[in-house]
Image (cartoon, grey):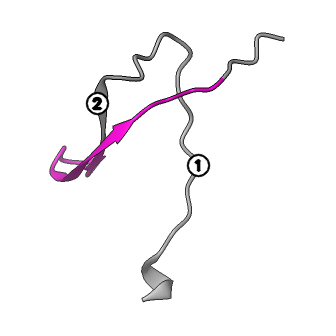
Amino acid sequence: MDDRKKAVKLGLKSGPFDNKKEYALVLRNAEDETEYERLPLMIDIAFANDF
C-alpha cells in the first residue's frame, strides 16, 4: 500500500480567503476532466508574509 502513496505540496494563490467558507480539493484526470473525488476543506491562514 505504501507504494501507492505520494506526498505533494499544494500552493495557494495570493488573495483573500474566508476562514468560515468551505472550499474543496478536487482530484481530477487532467486528460479527460473526469472527477474522481472532491474533499471538503477549510483554509485558515494565521498570517501572511508580505516581505
Residue at 56% from the left image edge and 35% from the top image edge: 11
Is 34 left or right of 12, judged from the image as shown? left
Identified at 47% across, 75% down, the residue is: 5
**Quadrant in the rendering for residue 51:** top right
The numbered mark, 1 or 2, whose residue comes first in the sequence reads 1
Q: Position of residue 22 (x, y in %)?
A: 28, 30
Location of residue 36 by image quarter:
bottom left
- For disc 1, the marked residue is 9
Q: Residues within 10 Å of mark 2 (few under 14, many from 20)?
A: few
Assign a secondary structure to mark 2.
strand
Relative image position of residue 9 (x, y in whole percent) = 58, 48
Residue nearer the viewer, 43 or 34 = 43
Query: Against 40, is 22 above or below?
Result: above
Q: Position of residue 32 (x, y in %)?
A: 18, 47
Q: Look at the picture and state if 24 lies above or below 21.
A: below
Circles 1, 2 touching at the beta carbon (< 8 Å): no
**Marks 1/2: CA–CA distance:** 20 Å
Residue found at the far bottom of this picture: 1
- Please identify the quadrant where the N terminus is shown: bottom left
Name the amino acid type tagged 1: Lys
Horizontal side of 45 relative to 4 (left or right) equals right
Q: Which residues are magenta?
A: 26-46
- Residue 20 shows which numbered tag? none
Residue at the spot of label 2: 22
Which is nearer the eye, 50 or 10? 50
Task: Name the residue type under label 2.
Answer: Glu
Q: Please name which of the two marks, 1 or 2, marks the residue nearer to the observer.
A: 2
**Left or right: 43 in relation to 29:** right
